[in-house]
Image (cartoon, rainbow, N blue to C red):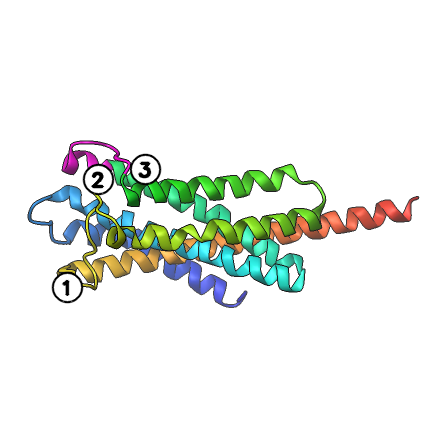
Amino acid sequence: MRKLFPALLILTTVMFAGAPFIIADALNEPTMGIVYKIFYFHVPLAWNAFLGFTVVFFASFRYLATRNPKWDARALAAAEVGVLFTTLVLITGPIWAKPVWGIWWTWDARLTSSFLLWVLFVSYLILRTLVDEPERRAMVSAVFGIFAALDIPLVYFSIWWFRTQHPQPVIGDGGSLDGRMWRVLMLCWLATLGVMTLLIRIRYRLEAMRTEVDALRMEASRNTR
């Protein structure tokens, strides 16, 4: 992974820097016009937030199975980046909604469950600050992280299970996204995925080093007694 990091950094930088120019040339949606182009940020951010929280789910399971602190560090890194991306989703959504719906926010199933997902993982991060003992903190956080991630299917399927103000899907299941729009969306998703991968990796390395320093500090403390 270390050998791939420079290439991933360069590729992500190129795609992310080029995305605004490609979005500017993309087609406007017939009824919404230029405001629709926030779609190319909003949707990739949401998809990758789901992916980040899915990493928390699996990393938490792995920690409970192995008690390896590296899995706890991975879960923490993914949770922090997932919260960042979900925050951006909750910001870009109302910016898009106001000119289209005439309101900034409505408590429909998709928006409410998305806000709940954000609250759950912010609570996950707060919970970690309330437990001092590392092993107990990791175990409690893993259980809560698995529970919090169960909201992901509710967010995703809410527009099928409930009547919502949120638009119906435009990809798959009868979606009608133009092919040129689809290609721009995929580029933006890949660029955002690259950013998320880099952020998680950097945050994981910081947490792993912090864990190593804490272990050395505890060992030194025992040796001086």
Q: Which type of secondary structure does the marked residue at label 1 adopt?
A: helix
Q: Residue at x 28, y 51 (%)?
A: 43
Q: Is residue 193 left or right of residue 180?
A: right
Q: Is residue 177 left or right of residue 190?
A: left
Crowding at mark 3 (Cα within 10 Å: few <14, some 14-19, many 20+): few
Label 3 amino acid? Ile
Measured in 3D between alpha carbons, the distance from the residue under mark 3 to the one under mark 1, in whole angstroms, is 27 Å
Residue 122: x percent and y percent?
Answer: 49, 40
Q: Which residue is mark 2?
A: 96
Q: Residue at x 46, y 52 (%)?
A: 149
Q: Residue furthest right?
A: 225
Observer able to see residue 144: yes
Q: Is residue 37 magenta?
A: no
Measured in 3D between alpha carbons, the distance from the residue under mark 3 to the one under mark 2, in whole angstroms, is 9 Å
Q: Which residue is mark 1?
A: 179
Of marks 1 and 2, which one's residue comes earlier in the chain?
A: 2
Q: Quadrant of the C terminus?
A: top right
Query: For residue 186, which quarter of the picture?
Result: bottom left
Q: In the figure, 194 relative to 80: above or below? A: below
Q: Which residue is mark 3?
A: 91
Residue 169: x percent and y percent?
Answer: 21, 55
Crowding at mark 2 (Cα within 10 Å: few <14, some 14-19, many 20+): many
Q: Residue at x 50, y 46 (%)?
A: 80
Label 2 amino acid? Trp
Q: Which type of secondary structure does the marked residue at label 2 adopt?
A: helix
